[in-house]
Amino acid sequence: MRTFFLFIVLLLTISCTDSDAIRKENALKAAQKEQEIFKLLSQKWIFKPADFSEESYNIVQQWSEWNTFYNELLQKPQTDIGAFQRKTKTLIDLSYALHSTIPPVFNIVQIQSRFMVLETKLKMLKTYLSLDDIPMEKTIEIISAINTEIESIVNRMATILAKNKIQREEGEIELLNSIAVPQQQTTDEAEIEF
């Protein structure tokens, strides 16, 4: 019986030692993987400077919420994956302020919808960075998509300003208003019928 008891104690001691070694080895592998992901993320976290037209730049320069958001976007986190997660959360919070402060000249559906898409892509980035096993391929794709969306916003701003410069013909505004009013009434009448 005594031999059996010593055998059990010896077996438990060996298994505990093996578990500690396995746990330490797994922790080391996880730390190495996190370092590799951080290094790759640092290389791919590149946001391009916006190519504003002079006129749109003058307007956007006065838009403090955009400037805060954009400056935050261009600053790359330096310490660890947690810094990237915090940066993404900050960008999402700052993007909320953009919706309610769009300058009047740009406050149209096309710009508003682009900001909503940008916000969605930032939330996707936050989701990817929050996972235990970060999907780097998707993360890199979403960083590229965010760059594309910002470029789309900047291009749309330039287009809006260019269209505003086009002179209207005499009576064109009245004609457009008269066309818009019957459509509005038709829409209202259609809603009443249902």
Image: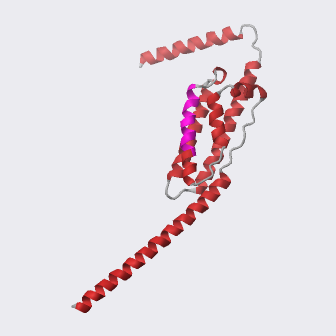
Q: Report the number of numbered marks.
A: 0
Position in image of residue 76 (x %, y %): 65, 47
Viewer can see residue 23? yes
Residue farthest to the left?
A: 1
Colour mode?
Answer: secondary structure
Residue toward you, 113 or 45: 45
Viewer can see residue 120? no
Against 168, residue 31 (above or below) is below
In the rendered image, residue 32 lying in the magenta stretch gets the answer no
The residue that appears at 42% across and 78% down in the rendered structure is 18
Position in image of residue 13 (x %, y %): 35, 81
Quadrant including the C terminus? top left
Position in image of residue 130 (x %, y %): 50, 51
Against 25, residue 192 (above or below) is above
Quadrant including the N terminus? bottom left
Position in image of residue 144 (x %, y %): 66, 47
The residue that appears at 62% across and 54% down in the rendered structure is 41
Against 113, residue 188 (above or below) is above
Which residues are drawn in magenta?
87-100
* Prevailing SS of the magenta stretch: helix
In the drawing, does residue 76 fall left or right of residue 7?
right
Residue toward you, 63 or 17: 17
The residue that appears at 49% across and 57% down in the rendered structure is 132
Residue toward you, 138 or 32: 32
The residue that appears at 40% across and 78% down in the rendered structure is 17
In the drawing, does residue 17 fall left or right of residue 92?
left
In the picture, residue 59 is in which quadrant? top right
